[in-house]
Structure formats: structure tokens, C-alpha cells
Image: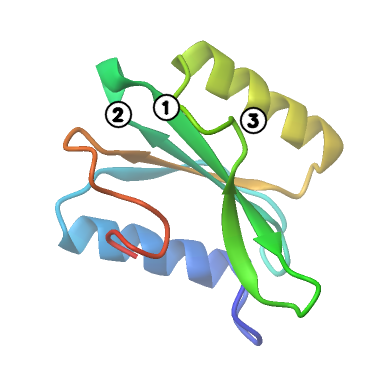
Amino acid sequence: MVMGLTTSLWVSAQIRLCDRNFIPATVVRRGDPDAGTVLLKVNRFDKGVIVYAQTSSLDGDQGWAKGTGPEPVQEVDADAYVKRQIGRDPDVWVLEIEDRKGGWAPGGGAF
């Protein structure tokens, strides 16, 4: 997250940005309100699902990686990935975004 910004505030801002752009977004799971990691589950329905995982470089730069791989997966596979991540980190947040048009991406879409 942005330095000094809590995860809960960042997630709330993302929900609001999606709402302003008519993109349905829902907090599926709340993690640690101050410093939880975020998973973004982008559901494109019949075109599959991608789960983006928060990453950081050695320099501390924040970014996103496709946790479920380079290609969209079925929702059941995305949910299994999310479940494994929650098992590893109980403080994780999960934000689901419904992207029927397929143009959304972290940092380049509504956010």
C-alpha cells in the first residue's frame, strides 16, 4: 500500500473508484485493516478469472503479479488459489471486480 495509507482505506478507495466507473466491486474478505495484503479477483465471467497478487520489488516499489498465471482460469481454480493464499496469510484482503468488457487491469483500469 501507499506509505501511511491503511489497507482498509485503500480498499475503500478502490471500491469507490470502481463504483464511479460503473464497475461492480465487492470486498469478499477483510484482512488486517492496517497492513493486510490484497488479492484482486477480476472476474470476466465466460472469459475466465485472473487473480492479481500484490508484490513489491527489492527497491520497495509496489506492483501486481498474475497469481493464477498468464491466462484466465475457471472461477473454481481462482477460488482455490485465493483459499491457498488465505491459508498462508490470514490477514489477506480479497477484492472481487466484475469486468464483463475485459479492459480492466490493476494500475491501468479503474484504479
Q: CA distance from mark 1 to mark 2?
A: 6 Å
Can you tell which of label 2 and label 3 is closer to the viewer?
2
73 left or right of 101 in image: right
Q: Quadrant of the N terminus?
A: bottom right
Which dot, 3 or 1, sits closer to the camera? 1
Residues at discs 1 and 2 in contact (Cβ within 8 Å): yes
- Above or below, 45 against 70 in this view is above
The amino acid sitting under disc 2 is Arg
Mark 1 highlights which residue? Answer: 49
Label 3, residues with CA under 10 Å away: few <14, some 14-19, many ≥20: many
Q: Amino acid at mark 1?
A: Val
Q: Residue at x 82, y 31 (%)?
A: 87
Question: Residue 83, how many percent across, how many down?
Answer: 69, 25
Q: Which residue is mark 2?
A: 44
- Above or below residue 10? Residue 82 is above
Residue assigned mark 3? 82
Residue 24 location (% of width, % of height): 25, 43
| Residue at screen point 85% across, 37% down | 88
